[in-house]
Amino acid sequence: MSEPSALFPTVLASSVHDIKNSLGMLLQSLEAVVERVPVEQRPGFHELAVLQYEAARVNNSLVQLLALYKLDNQQLPLNIGHHMVADFLQEQGLRNQNLLNLKQIQLDIEVDDDLAWYFDYDLIASVIDNIITNSIRYTHSKLLLRADIEDDQLVIVIADDGPGYPRAMLETPDRYLLGINRSTGSTGLGLFFAGEIARLHRRADVHGRVQLRNGQCLEGGEFRLYLP
Amino acid sequence: MISYADKTFLIVDDFAEFRRSLRGMVQQLGAEDIDMAGTGEEAIALCVNRRYDIVLSDYNLGDGKDGQQILEELIERKLLKRGAIFVMITAENSTAMVMGALEYQPDAYITKPFNKVALQARLDKLMEKRLALAEIDQALEKNDIDKAIALCDREISQKSRYALACLRTKAELLEQEDRLAEAATIYASLSQDRPVPWAMLGLARVTLGQGEAEEARKQFEDVIRQLPTLTPAYDGLAKTWLGLGETVKAQQVLLEAVRRSPKAVLRQAELGQVASKNGDLDTATRAFRQAVNLGRHSVHKSPESYLKLADCLVQGIGSNPVEDKRASDEISKTLFELDSEYKDDKQISMRSLLTQGSLAHKQKRTKDAENAAVGASKLLQELDSSSLPPEIALDVADKFMALGKQDVAKAVLRTCAELYSDNPEVLAKCAEQLADNSVIKHTDQALALNALGIAEFEQKKYDAALLHFREAVKLAPRNISIVLNTAQTLLEKYRGQPQHALLEECQGYLDQVRKMPDTDKRYKRFQGLMQFTQQMRKA
């Protein structure tokens, strides 16, 4: 019999894994249900939007928990590949398309078609997917995905026209793991995760990082991910 | 718009619900020809009959083959046409799979859940890439490596969106062509700034290939430090340690890799080998047991693992009655499965019998041991001991010896010594077991003549070379290297002056080694020489 302290994280990790599988099926079925609803009836189908949004949130949290658990155990693999940024951002947008439609949010993507960069596709996808889901919650009507090169680093920006990030978050976004904020339900897990994943990306001695700003491109919150 | 109407699809998933949902999505993309499979075995069976354009397979398929094993088998058995697209569908982050299996990678991983538009976007990109690189595929299909490299260079210099993919293909082709320095330059330039896994690994692999073991060790260790989940790097490091003679360190590295990624059949078998070499019976037994269990659904299933597992278990017998009973049951079960899986392979049947004999001998069942030994020697006669690779011949001889069949054992060892006399390690072991040093002295002279012949052949002095080779082959008529060298020189001479007698002589030498094992590195060369000789004789 192992020590309870050693056993628990393992049990937790494998349970999370199992829940994740079920949730995958649930989300897939939900997508299928949405597909069956005639397109013109979708906008305003409030319950479907809630279902999709909440399920996506649970899914993102589980992905992050699993990844952080592995990171803690030196088991999180890093697979730096060379990817077309436009294709990548487009795919992240498309993944959330049904939800965006249901909530009548307009998503714009601004990126040079030929821009390519080095990063771990899966990990950065989890980061972006999570931030998009989060922004869908806070934005009024618009989301912007933008990418370009600044000082020889790739910068991916996710901006909205919502109320912006709380002040406390702006200062130390990736250390904003302050327990659950009772009014918003936010734990800061997503930003913590984003910061950890960004840091794994490095070029020579420069590591990736995240930054939050308010009142910039869409006058709302702005999430910036720097990948060297 | 890319059309999927004329494309054939295969969908593999163990959940009927998900299969239907995926088929629905693919149909909405315009696909009409869609097959579905619920297990890996079904998927393989379908692929034997049809070459699909696009395979969408879930990774997790329950108890049988998983998605990765399907992909491995399709590639190994050449059931995927070049230009086909294989997409692996996973329930979670797929990076762990990528890092564990660099050699067999799908064209893309896609993570559940996904919707129709995301799938379409992904498939469209893959199709565009295939289309853009079709010329390279065609050149590779025709095995025109130079052209493929030139086409890669074109993409690279145009800085196309596939430039990096082409750079990787180019580096791998250069490696395949043994142009290691050029490959190293590419890998090094890519791994300088960022930890790009395949480039870092490629660089270390090429360094090892260039014979710089110490430098390769440092590089592999650096890869592991930066990318601890990249398990192929551990395999490379273990190989490097083995080359440096550090078998204990090799074992440690393999153990770590197995701990991180326990499902790799080949790695378990390798660990078993290294642990045996180190005399670590427990580790070897466990590793071979894993290789057998994991291998059942894999194209890498090998009878060697069954035999080695049984051998390890036999060796371990004698500790205590309860353990012994359990071990002997496992031996029976293992060999029974082996016998039924490989019942047409005489070599395997013989070795299985020998292991059964060893067990009986150890358990003092004299009659059973004798029967097994007699049966095994009959099978040996049928299959001819010159077909045994040297390490197997030595093992087989050892077992016959222990079972009291000294004559059979000695005959096997003599044949082995004759065929492989240019391998000092094998020769020394044969001499040791035979307790007869004359086998070594005898071949020293033949090898000296062989060396002279090779030098002359390289200077195109075929007559002089032939003189030495003929002397050598007289002394060692069944030494594979000497026979092949002599044959090649005769054929070279025949090209200059086509005399039929040269061909007859050549055929005579080649016949001496015609049973050589097809696992031998020189087998291809032998086949080539044999075919050419036979064609010329008929002409």
Image (cartoon, coloured by chain):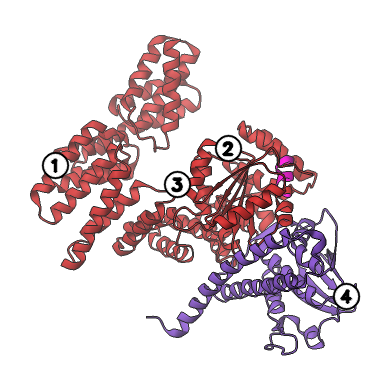
Chain colours: A purple, B red
Q: Residue at x 17, y 39 (%)?
A: B375
Marks 2,3: beta carbons within 8 A? no
| Predominant SS along the magenta part | helix
Answer yes or no: is residue A92 visible.
yes
Extreme-bottom residue of the structure? A182
**Tag 1 secondary structure:** loop
Q: CA distance from mark 2 to mark 1?
A: 52 Å
As rendered, which of B283 and A194 lies closer to the eye?
A: A194
Left or right, B399 with respect to B184, comes to: left
Q: Are marks 1 and 4 on the same chain?
A: no
Amino acid type assigned to the residue bearing label 2 in the image = Arg
Amino acid type assigned to the residue bearing label 4 in the image = Asp
Amino acid type assigned to the residue bearing label 3 in the image = Val
Q: Chain of mark 1?
A: B
**Tag 4 secondary structure:** loop
Q: Which residue is mark 4?
A: A161
Q: Chain of mark 3?
A: B
Which segment did they paint magenta? B125-132
Q: Chain of mark 2?
A: B
Which labelled disc corresponds to residue B299?
Answer: 3
Q: Nearer the viewer, mark 1 or mark 4?
A: 4
Marks 4,3: beta carbons within 8 A? no
Q: Which comes before the other along the chain, label 2 or label 1?
A: 2
Q: Residue at x 48, y 62 (%)?
A: B261
